[in-house]
Image (tube, rainbow, N blue to C red):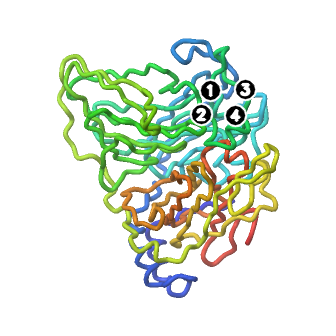
Protein backbone atom coordinates (compact mmCIF):
# COMPACT_ATOMS: atom_id res chain seq x y z
CA UNK A 1 0.00 0.00 0.00
CA UNK A 2 1.30 3.41 -0.90
CA UNK A 3 2.82 5.29 2.03
CA UNK A 4 4.19 8.71 1.40
CA UNK A 5 5.20 11.53 3.70
CA UNK A 6 4.67 15.14 2.70
CA UNK A 7 7.75 17.24 3.29
CA UNK A 8 7.62 20.90 4.20
CA UNK A 9 8.44 21.78 0.62
CA UNK A 10 5.55 19.67 -0.64
CA UNK A 11 3.20 21.28 1.87
CA UNK A 12 4.33 24.68 0.64
CA UNK A 13 3.39 23.64 -2.89
CA UNK A 14 0.05 22.42 -1.57
CA UNK A 15 -0.57 25.81 0.02
CA UNK A 16 -0.12 27.49 -3.34
CA UNK A 17 -2.75 25.21 -4.85
CA UNK A 18 -5.35 25.66 -2.12
CA UNK A 19 -7.68 28.09 -3.92
CA UNK A 20 -8.19 25.56 -6.69
CA UNK A 21 -8.31 22.35 -4.65
CA UNK A 22 -10.03 23.30 -1.39
CA UNK A 23 -13.56 21.98 -1.08
CA UNK A 24 -16.25 23.05 1.37
CA UNK A 25 -13.75 25.29 3.12
CA UNK A 26 -12.94 28.98 2.90
CA UNK A 27 -9.61 28.89 0.99
CA UNK A 28 -7.99 31.78 2.85
CA UNK A 29 -8.88 30.29 6.23
CA UNK A 30 -7.57 26.87 5.25
CA UNK A 31 -4.43 28.48 3.87
CA UNK A 32 -3.90 30.19 7.21
CA UNK A 33 -4.38 26.96 9.17
CA UNK A 34 -2.03 25.02 6.91
CA UNK A 35 0.57 27.79 7.14
CA UNK A 36 0.60 27.27 10.91
CA UNK A 37 0.87 23.53 10.40
CA UNK A 38 3.78 23.52 7.94
CA UNK A 39 6.34 24.60 10.52
CA UNK A 40 4.80 22.75 13.43
CA UNK A 41 4.17 19.16 12.48
CA UNK A 42 6.95 16.64 13.12
CA UNK A 43 9.05 16.22 10.00
CA UNK A 44 10.16 12.87 8.68
CA UNK A 45 13.77 12.00 9.42
CA UNK A 46 15.98 10.72 6.67
CA UNK A 47 17.20 7.15 7.26
CA UNK A 48 20.89 7.23 8.16
CA UNK A 49 21.59 3.67 7.03
CA UNK A 50 21.86 2.25 10.55
CA UNK A 51 19.59 -0.73 11.18
CA UNK A 52 18.77 -1.81 14.73
CA UNK A 53 17.67 -5.45 14.74
CA UNK A 54 15.62 -7.09 17.47
CA UNK A 55 14.14 -10.55 17.95
CA UNK A 56 10.81 -10.73 19.75
CA UNK A 57 8.89 -13.89 20.60
CA UNK A 58 5.42 -13.95 22.11
CA UNK A 59 4.77 -16.99 24.31
CA UNK A 60 3.00 -18.14 27.46
CA UNK A 61 5.26 -18.14 30.51
CA UNK A 62 5.11 -17.99 34.29
CA UNK A 63 6.82 -14.99 35.87
CA UNK A 64 7.35 -13.72 39.41
CA UNK A 65 5.32 -10.56 38.85
CA UNK A 66 3.29 -8.58 41.37
CA UNK A 67 6.00 -8.62 44.03
CA UNK A 68 7.31 -12.09 43.34
CA UNK A 69 4.11 -14.12 43.16
CA UNK A 70 4.13 -16.55 40.21
CA UNK A 71 1.73 -15.38 37.50
CA UNK A 72 0.89 -17.14 34.23
CA UNK A 73 1.11 -14.52 31.49
CA UNK A 74 1.66 -14.04 27.78
CA UNK A 75 4.90 -12.17 27.32
CA UNK A 76 7.32 -10.75 24.80
CA UNK A 77 10.72 -12.42 25.27
CA UNK A 78 9.64 -13.87 28.60
CA UNK A 79 9.23 -10.54 30.39
CA UNK A 80 6.45 -8.14 31.37
CA UNK A 81 6.66 -5.38 30.36
CA UNK A 82 8.26 -6.62 27.16
CA UNK A 83 11.74 -5.59 26.05
CA UNK A 84 12.44 -1.86 25.92
CA UNK A 85 13.54 -1.04 22.38
CA UNK A 86 15.71 2.06 22.03
CA UNK A 87 16.86 3.61 18.78
CA UNK A 88 18.01 7.03 17.61
CA UNK A 89 15.95 9.14 15.23
CA UNK A 90 16.99 8.24 11.69
CA UNK A 91 17.78 4.62 12.52
CA UNK A 92 15.73 1.81 11.02
CA UNK A 93 13.92 -0.64 13.30
CA UNK A 94 13.91 -4.27 12.18
CA UNK A 95 11.98 -6.71 14.39
CA UNK A 96 11.83 -10.41 13.63
CA UNK A 97 8.69 -11.49 15.44
CA UNK A 98 7.71 -15.09 16.20
CA UNK A 99 4.30 -16.14 17.49
CA UNK A 100 4.40 -18.99 20.04
CA UNK A 101 0.89 -18.25 21.32
CA UNK A 102 -2.22 -20.41 20.82
CA UNK A 103 -3.86 -17.51 18.92
CA UNK A 104 -3.04 -15.36 15.90
CA UNK A 105 -1.49 -12.04 16.86
CA UNK A 106 0.21 -8.92 15.49
CA UNK A 107 2.36 -6.05 16.72
CA UNK A 108 0.94 -2.55 16.43
CA UNK A 109 3.45 0.27 16.91
CA UNK A 110 1.29 2.67 18.89
CA UNK A 111 1.92 6.32 17.98
CA UNK A 112 4.65 5.54 15.45
CA UNK A 113 4.08 6.77 11.90
CA UNK A 114 4.94 3.61 9.99
CA UNK A 115 4.16 2.31 6.48
CA UNK A 116 0.57 1.10 6.30
CA UNK A 117 1.55 -2.55 6.00
CA UNK A 118 3.74 -2.34 9.14
CA UNK A 119 0.93 -0.97 11.35
CA UNK A 120 -0.07 -4.39 12.69
CA UNK A 121 -3.78 -4.06 11.93
CA UNK A 122 -5.05 -7.20 10.19
CA UNK A 123 -7.83 -5.25 8.47
CA UNK A 124 -5.12 -3.75 6.31
CA UNK A 125 -2.92 -5.46 3.75
CA UNK A 126 -1.26 -8.08 5.98
CA UNK A 127 -3.12 -10.86 7.82
CA UNK A 128 -2.49 -11.72 11.45
CA UNK A 129 0.53 -13.87 12.28
CA UNK A 130 -0.62 -17.41 13.00
CA UNK A 131 0.74 -19.61 15.81
CA UNK A 132 4.19 -20.88 14.86
CA UNK A 133 4.68 -18.24 12.15
CA UNK A 134 7.18 -15.38 12.00
CA UNK A 135 7.14 -11.97 10.38
CA UNK A 136 9.66 -9.15 10.01
CA UNK A 137 8.50 -5.63 10.86
CA UNK A 138 10.74 -2.93 9.41
CA UNK A 139 10.33 0.84 9.48
CA UNK A 140 12.20 4.07 10.13
CA UNK A 141 10.43 6.15 12.81
CA UNK A 142 9.69 9.69 11.66
CA UNK A 143 9.47 11.18 15.12
CA UNK A 144 11.51 11.04 18.31
CA UNK A 145 9.48 10.21 21.39
CA UNK A 146 7.91 7.68 23.73
CA UNK A 147 5.90 4.99 21.96
CA UNK A 148 4.76 1.46 22.74
CA UNK A 149 3.76 -1.77 21.02
CA UNK A 150 1.00 -4.32 21.54
CA UNK A 151 -1.24 -6.75 19.62
CA UNK A 152 -4.07 -5.41 17.48
CA UNK A 153 -6.21 -8.54 17.34
CA UNK A 154 -8.09 -9.87 20.36
CA UNK A 155 -6.38 -6.99 22.13
CA UNK A 156 -8.67 -7.01 25.15
CA UNK A 157 -7.34 -10.47 26.02
CA UNK A 158 -3.78 -10.38 24.68
CA UNK A 159 -2.81 -7.02 26.20
CA UNK A 160 -4.45 -7.98 29.50
CA UNK A 161 -2.39 -11.17 29.57
CA UNK A 162 0.84 -9.13 29.38
CA UNK A 163 1.69 -8.41 25.74
CA UNK A 164 3.06 -4.86 25.68
CA UNK A 165 6.44 -3.17 25.45
CA UNK A 166 7.97 0.28 24.98
CA UNK A 167 9.75 1.78 21.99
CA UNK A 168 11.88 4.84 22.71
CA UNK A 169 13.07 6.89 19.74
CA UNK A 170 15.77 9.17 21.09
CA UNK A 171 16.58 12.63 19.83
CA UNK A 172 19.77 12.93 17.80
CA UNK A 173 21.11 15.10 20.64
CA UNK A 174 19.03 14.18 23.70
CA UNK A 175 18.86 16.66 26.62
CA UNK A 176 21.34 15.94 29.38
CA UNK A 177 19.05 14.54 32.07
CA UNK A 178 20.65 12.72 34.99
CA UNK A 179 18.67 9.64 33.96
CA UNK A 180 15.97 8.49 31.56
CA UNK A 181 13.36 6.38 33.40
CA UNK A 182 10.31 4.51 32.04
CA UNK A 183 7.19 3.68 34.05
CA UNK A 184 4.70 1.33 32.41
CA UNK A 185 1.44 1.64 34.37
CA UNK A 186 -1.17 -1.08 34.21
CA UNK A 187 -3.80 -2.92 36.21
CA UNK A 188 -4.52 -6.62 36.50
CA UNK A 189 -7.73 -8.44 37.34
CA UNK A 190 -6.73 -11.46 39.42
CA UNK A 191 -8.95 -14.13 40.92
CA UNK A 192 -8.76 -15.79 44.32
CA UNK A 193 -6.18 -18.21 42.91
CA UNK A 194 -3.87 -15.27 42.22
CA UNK A 195 -4.08 -15.75 38.45
CA UNK A 196 -5.49 -13.58 35.65
CA UNK A 197 -9.28 -13.95 35.54
CA UNK A 198 -9.81 -15.75 32.20
CA UNK A 199 -13.27 -14.28 31.52
CA UNK A 200 -12.64 -11.61 28.89
CA UNK A 201 -15.14 -9.24 27.28
CA UNK A 202 -17.71 -9.83 29.99
CA UNK A 203 -21.02 -8.04 29.78
CA UNK A 204 -20.04 -5.94 32.80
CA UNK A 205 -16.75 -4.83 31.21
CA UNK A 206 -18.43 -4.08 27.90
CA UNK A 207 -21.27 -2.12 29.49
CA UNK A 208 -18.89 -0.07 31.61
CA UNK A 209 -15.45 1.47 31.05
CA UNK A 210 -13.77 -1.77 30.07
CA UNK A 211 -11.87 -4.16 32.31
CA UNK A 212 -10.51 -2.51 35.45
CA UNK A 213 -8.16 -4.63 37.52
CA UNK A 214 -7.85 -5.08 41.28
CA UNK A 215 -4.05 -4.70 41.26
CA UNK A 216 -2.28 -1.59 39.91
CA UNK A 217 1.34 -1.98 38.86
CA UNK A 218 4.27 0.06 37.64
CA UNK A 219 6.66 -2.00 35.52
CA UNK A 220 4.87 -5.15 36.69
CA UNK A 221 5.33 -4.39 40.40
CA UNK A 222 2.92 -3.11 43.04
CA UNK A 223 5.71 -1.66 45.18
CA UNK A 224 7.73 0.32 42.62
CA UNK A 225 10.30 2.56 44.33
CA UNK A 226 12.40 5.06 42.40
CA UNK A 227 15.57 5.99 44.29
CA UNK A 228 16.96 9.43 43.44
CA UNK A 229 19.86 11.44 44.77
CA UNK A 230 19.43 15.10 45.76
CA UNK A 231 19.92 17.28 42.71
CA UNK A 232 19.01 14.64 40.14
CA UNK A 233 16.86 15.73 37.23
CA UNK A 234 15.23 12.90 35.34
CA UNK A 235 13.12 12.36 32.26
CA UNK A 236 10.28 10.15 33.46
CA UNK A 237 8.35 8.51 30.61
CA UNK A 238 4.95 7.19 31.71
CA UNK A 239 2.96 4.83 29.46
CA UNK A 240 -0.60 3.69 30.22
CA UNK A 241 -1.08 0.15 28.84
CA UNK A 242 -4.24 -0.69 30.81
CA UNK A 243 -7.30 -2.06 29.03
CA UNK A 244 -9.63 0.56 30.44
CA UNK A 245 -8.29 2.33 33.52
CA UNK A 246 -7.49 6.04 33.32
CA UNK A 247 -4.69 7.34 35.54
CA UNK A 248 -4.13 10.86 36.84
CA UNK A 249 -0.72 10.81 38.57
CA UNK A 250 -0.16 13.26 41.41
CA UNK A 251 3.50 14.02 42.11
CA UNK A 252 3.04 15.19 45.67
CA UNK A 253 4.66 18.60 45.42
CA UNK A 254 7.70 17.54 43.41
CA UNK A 255 8.82 19.88 40.64
CA UNK A 256 7.32 17.92 37.73
CA UNK A 257 6.53 19.41 34.32
CA UNK A 258 5.14 17.63 31.27
CA UNK A 259 7.44 18.20 28.29
CA UNK A 260 5.91 15.71 25.84
CA UNK A 261 2.49 14.17 25.26
CA UNK A 262 2.01 11.02 23.19
CA UNK A 263 5.66 11.17 22.20
CA UNK A 264 5.84 14.73 20.87
CA UNK A 265 7.24 17.78 22.66
CA UNK A 266 4.74 20.35 23.92
CA UNK A 267 4.86 24.04 23.06
CA UNK A 268 5.18 25.06 26.71
CA UNK A 269 5.90 22.68 29.64
CA UNK A 270 3.11 22.55 32.22
CA UNK A 271 2.43 21.05 35.64
CA UNK A 272 2.23 17.27 35.50
CA UNK A 273 -0.05 16.57 38.45
CA UNK A 274 -3.60 15.64 37.53
CA UNK A 275 -3.05 15.09 33.80
CA UNK A 276 -5.52 12.44 32.63
CA UNK A 277 -3.55 9.55 31.19
CA UNK A 278 -6.07 7.45 29.26
CA UNK A 279 -5.30 3.98 27.88
CA UNK A 280 -2.71 4.46 25.13
CA UNK A 281 -1.54 7.90 26.32
CA UNK A 282 2.07 8.69 27.21
CA UNK A 283 3.65 11.65 28.97
CA UNK A 284 7.29 12.64 29.42
CA UNK A 285 7.86 14.41 32.73
CA UNK A 286 10.80 16.67 33.57
CA UNK A 287 11.20 15.85 37.27
CA UNK A 288 13.55 17.30 39.89
CA UNK A 289 14.50 15.35 43.01
CA UNK A 290 13.76 17.01 46.31
CA UNK A 291 15.90 17.19 49.41
CA UNK A 292 17.61 14.20 51.00
CA UNK A 293 15.32 12.19 53.22
CA UNK A 294 12.20 12.90 51.20
CA UNK A 295 9.82 10.02 50.48
CA UNK A 296 7.04 11.03 48.12
CA UNK A 297 4.09 8.79 47.35
CA UNK A 298 2.98 9.13 43.71
CA UNK A 299 -0.76 8.58 43.69
CA UNK A 300 -3.37 8.06 41.00
CA UNK A 301 -6.20 10.52 41.65
CA UNK A 302 -8.42 9.95 38.62
CA UNK A 303 -11.05 8.55 40.99
CA UNK A 304 -10.83 11.42 43.44
CA UNK A 305 -12.69 9.61 46.21
CA UNK A 306 -10.43 6.56 45.90
CA UNK A 307 -6.78 7.56 45.33
CA UNK A 308 -4.38 4.67 44.73
CA UNK A 309 -0.66 4.50 45.27
CA UNK A 310 1.31 4.07 42.06
CA UNK A 311 4.90 4.28 43.27
CA UNK A 312 7.20 5.98 45.70
CA UNK A 313 10.13 8.31 45.05
CA UNK A 314 12.82 8.28 47.73
CA UNK A 315 15.58 10.86 47.80
CA UNK A 316 18.75 9.84 49.61
CA UNK A 317 22.53 9.79 49.31
CA UNK A 318 25.11 12.38 48.38
CA UNK A 319 23.85 15.30 46.31
CA UNK A 320 24.77 15.64 42.65
CA UNK A 321 24.97 18.69 40.45
CA UNK A 322 21.62 19.41 38.82
CA UNK A 323 21.78 19.49 35.00
CA UNK A 324 20.93 22.99 33.79
CA UNK A 325 19.13 23.35 30.48
CA UNK A 326 15.84 24.57 29.11
CA UNK A 327 13.46 21.64 28.64
CA UNK A 328 12.98 20.72 24.99
CA UNK A 329 9.81 22.10 23.43
CA UNK A 330 8.05 22.37 20.09
CA UNK A 331 7.51 26.11 20.01
CA UNK A 332 5.57 26.01 16.77
CA UNK A 333 2.66 23.78 17.80
CA UNK A 334 -0.17 25.50 15.88
CA UNK A 335 -2.69 27.58 17.81
CA UNK A 336 -5.40 26.78 15.24
CA UNK A 337 -7.70 29.20 17.04
CA UNK A 338 -9.76 29.51 13.85
CA UNK A 339 -9.88 25.74 13.34
CA UNK A 340 -13.39 25.43 14.75
CA UNK A 341 -14.62 27.91 12.10
CA UNK A 342 -13.90 25.34 9.42
CA UNK A 343 -17.00 23.23 8.74
CA UNK A 344 -16.97 19.84 10.45
CA UNK A 345 -15.62 17.33 7.94
CA UNK A 346 -16.93 14.32 9.84
CA UNK A 347 -18.86 13.93 13.08
CA UNK A 348 -18.39 10.62 14.84
CA UNK A 349 -21.25 9.74 17.18
CA UNK A 350 -20.06 7.35 19.90
CA UNK A 351 -22.77 5.17 21.38
CA UNK A 352 -23.88 1.64 22.32
CA UNK A 353 -26.74 -0.72 21.53
CA UNK A 354 -27.81 -4.27 22.23
CA UNK A 355 -26.67 -6.98 19.85
CA UNK A 356 -23.54 -8.51 18.36
CA UNK A 357 -21.55 -11.51 19.56
CA UNK A 358 -21.12 -10.06 23.08
CA UNK A 359 -24.71 -8.87 23.52
CA UNK A 360 -23.53 -5.24 23.45
CA UNK A 361 -22.14 -3.31 20.50
CA UNK A 362 -20.22 -0.07 20.67
CA UNK A 363 -20.84 2.00 17.55
CA UNK A 364 -19.52 4.92 15.54
CA UNK A 365 -22.35 6.64 13.69
CA UNK A 366 -24.57 3.68 14.41
CA UNK A 367 -22.19 1.12 12.89
CA UNK A 368 -20.23 -1.53 14.80
CA UNK A 369 -17.01 -2.56 13.09
CA UNK A 370 -17.29 -6.26 12.35
CA UNK A 371 -14.22 -8.41 12.88
CA UNK A 372 -10.48 -7.86 12.70
CA UNK A 373 -9.68 -10.04 9.73
CA UNK A 374 -11.45 -8.02 7.07
CA UNK A 375 -12.88 -4.55 6.63
CA UNK A 376 -14.96 -5.68 3.65
CA UNK A 377 -18.20 -3.77 3.45
CA UNK A 378 -17.21 -1.20 6.06
CA UNK A 379 -17.48 2.39 4.90
CA UNK A 380 -14.54 4.40 6.12
CA UNK A 381 -14.14 8.17 6.45
CA UNK A 382 -12.32 9.78 3.48
CA UNK A 383 -9.70 12.41 4.33
CA UNK A 384 -7.55 14.34 1.87
CA UNK A 385 -3.80 14.19 2.35
CA UNK A 386 -2.35 17.57 3.31
CA UNK A 387 -5.72 19.20 3.98
CA UNK A 388 -6.94 20.57 7.32
CA UNK A 389 -9.80 18.44 8.60
CA UNK A 390 -12.16 19.33 11.43
CA UNK A 391 -13.36 16.14 13.16
CA UNK A 392 -15.93 15.95 15.93
CA UNK A 393 -16.16 13.14 18.51
CA UNK A 394 -19.63 13.28 20.07
CA UNK A 395 -20.01 10.92 23.02
CA UNK A 396 -23.72 10.08 23.39
CA UNK A 397 -23.02 7.44 26.02
CA UNK A 398 -22.48 7.45 29.76
CA UNK A 399 -19.01 5.91 29.41
CA UNK A 400 -15.45 7.07 28.75
CA UNK A 401 -13.98 6.77 25.25
CA UNK A 402 -10.26 7.45 24.64
CA UNK A 403 -10.21 7.90 20.86
CA UNK A 404 -6.96 6.87 19.18
CA UNK A 405 -5.90 7.65 15.60
CA UNK A 406 -3.32 5.57 13.78
CA UNK A 407 -0.83 7.16 11.39
CA UNK A 408 -1.31 10.78 12.42
CA UNK A 409 -1.34 13.28 15.25
CA UNK A 410 -4.07 15.84 15.95
CA UNK A 411 -4.74 18.83 18.16
CA UNK A 412 -7.81 19.39 20.35
CA UNK A 413 -9.71 22.53 19.33
CA UNK A 414 -12.76 22.59 21.61
CA UNK A 415 -14.53 20.66 24.34
CA UNK A 416 -18.30 21.05 24.40
CA UNK A 417 -17.93 24.01 22.06
CA UNK A 418 -15.47 25.89 24.27
CA UNK A 419 -12.01 26.59 22.91
CA UNK A 420 -9.11 24.94 24.73
CA UNK A 421 -5.44 25.76 24.48
CA UNK A 422 -3.70 22.42 24.67
CA UNK A 423 -0.13 23.27 23.64
CA UNK A 424 0.55 19.87 22.10
CA UNK A 425 -0.36 17.27 19.51
CA UNK A 426 -1.93 13.95 20.51
CA UNK A 427 -2.70 10.56 19.04
CA UNK A 428 -5.25 9.69 21.78
CA UNK A 429 -7.85 11.91 23.46
CA UNK A 430 -10.19 11.02 26.32
CA UNK A 431 -13.81 11.91 25.54
CA UNK A 432 -15.86 12.02 28.73
CA UNK A 433 -19.51 10.92 29.01
CA UNK A 434 -21.89 13.19 27.07
CA UNK A 435 -18.91 15.29 25.97
CA UNK A 436 -18.14 16.55 22.48
CA UNK A 437 -14.50 17.05 21.48
CA UNK A 438 -13.49 18.77 18.25
CA UNK A 439 -10.01 18.20 16.83
CA UNK A 440 -7.98 19.45 13.91
CA UNK A 441 -5.87 17.06 11.87
CA UNK A 442 -3.81 17.28 8.71
CA UNK A 443 -3.17 13.74 7.43
CA UNK A 444 0.31 13.47 5.99
CA UNK A 445 0.59 9.80 5.04
CA UNK A 446 -1.67 8.14 2.52
CA UNK A 447 -3.37 4.86 3.37
CA UNK A 448 -6.07 3.25 5.47
CA UNK A 449 -5.62 4.20 9.11
CA UNK A 450 -7.67 2.94 12.00
CA UNK A 451 -9.57 5.15 14.43
CA UNK A 452 -10.92 3.43 17.53
CA UNK A 453 -11.70 3.62 21.21
CA UNK A 454 -8.67 2.51 23.22
CA UNK A 455 -10.80 0.96 25.92
CA UNK A 456 -10.02 -2.38 24.41
CA UNK A 457 -13.35 -4.00 25.24
CA UNK A 458 -15.18 -1.15 23.49
CA UNK A 459 -12.98 -1.57 20.40
CA UNK A 460 -13.50 -5.33 20.45
CA UNK A 461 -17.28 -4.75 20.52
CA UNK A 462 -17.20 -2.52 17.44
CA UNK A 463 -16.04 1.03 18.24
CA UNK A 464 -13.60 1.20 15.35
CA UNK A 465 -13.56 2.65 11.86
CA UNK A 466 -11.07 3.47 9.10
CA UNK A 467 -9.72 6.84 8.00
CA UNK A 468 -9.08 6.58 4.26
CA UNK A 469 -6.40 9.13 3.38
CA UNK A 470 -5.97 9.85 -0.32
CA UNK A 471 -4.18 12.50 -2.33
CA UNK A 472 -5.94 15.70 -3.34
CA UNK A 473 -5.95 14.66 -7.00
CA UNK A 474 -6.42 10.92 -6.72
CA UNK A 475 -8.81 8.30 -5.42
CA UNK A 476 -9.00 7.57 -1.75
CA UNK A 477 -7.03 4.38 -1.08
CA UNK A 478 -8.06 1.50 1.08
CA UNK A 479 -10.82 -1.04 1.28
CA UNK A 480 -13.87 1.21 1.12
CA UNK A 481 -15.33 4.30 -0.43
CA UNK A 482 -18.09 6.72 0.49
Q: Which residue is mark 3?
A: 198
Residue assigned mark 4? 157
According to the image, label 2 marks what residue? Answer: 212
Q: Position of residue 93 (x, y in %)?
A: 55, 41
Q: Please, what secondary structure does the residue beneath circle 4 have?
A: helix
Residue 301, given in percent of the width and then of the height, sits at 42, 36
Q: CA distance from mark 4 to mark 1?
A: 12 Å
Please say if the residues under marks 1 and 2 sit with CB atoms less than 8 Å apart.
yes
- Looking at the rendered structure, the secondary structure element under dot 3 is loop
Of residues 168 and 238, which is closer to you in this image?
Answer: 238
Q: CA distance from mark 1 to mark 2?
A: 7 Å
Q: Is residue 481 above or below residue 206?
A: below
Asked if residue 3 lies left or right of residue 461, the reply is: left
- Closer to the N terminus: mark 2 or mark 4? 4
Q: Is residue 374 above or below residue 152?
A: below
* Label 3 neighbour load within 10 Å: few <14, some 14-19, many 20+: few
Residue 394 or 26: which is nearer the viewer?
A: 394
Residue displayed at 45% across by 72% down: 339
SS class, disc 2: loop
Residue that mark 1 sits on? 189
Amino acid sequence: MKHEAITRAALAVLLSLLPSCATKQEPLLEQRLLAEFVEAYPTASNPNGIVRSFDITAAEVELPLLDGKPLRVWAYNGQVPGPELRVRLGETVRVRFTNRLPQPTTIHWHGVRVPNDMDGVPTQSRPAIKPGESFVYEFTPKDAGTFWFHPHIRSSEQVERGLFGVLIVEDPAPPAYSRDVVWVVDDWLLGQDGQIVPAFNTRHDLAHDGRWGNHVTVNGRTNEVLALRPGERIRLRIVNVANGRVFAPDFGGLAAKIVAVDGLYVRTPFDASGFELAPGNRIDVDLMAGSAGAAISIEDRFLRSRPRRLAEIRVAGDPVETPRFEPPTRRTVPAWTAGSEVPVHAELALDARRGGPFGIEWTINGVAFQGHESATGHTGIPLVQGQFNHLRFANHSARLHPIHLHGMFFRVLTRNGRAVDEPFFRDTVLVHPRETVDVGVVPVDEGSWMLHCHILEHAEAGMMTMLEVGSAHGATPGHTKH
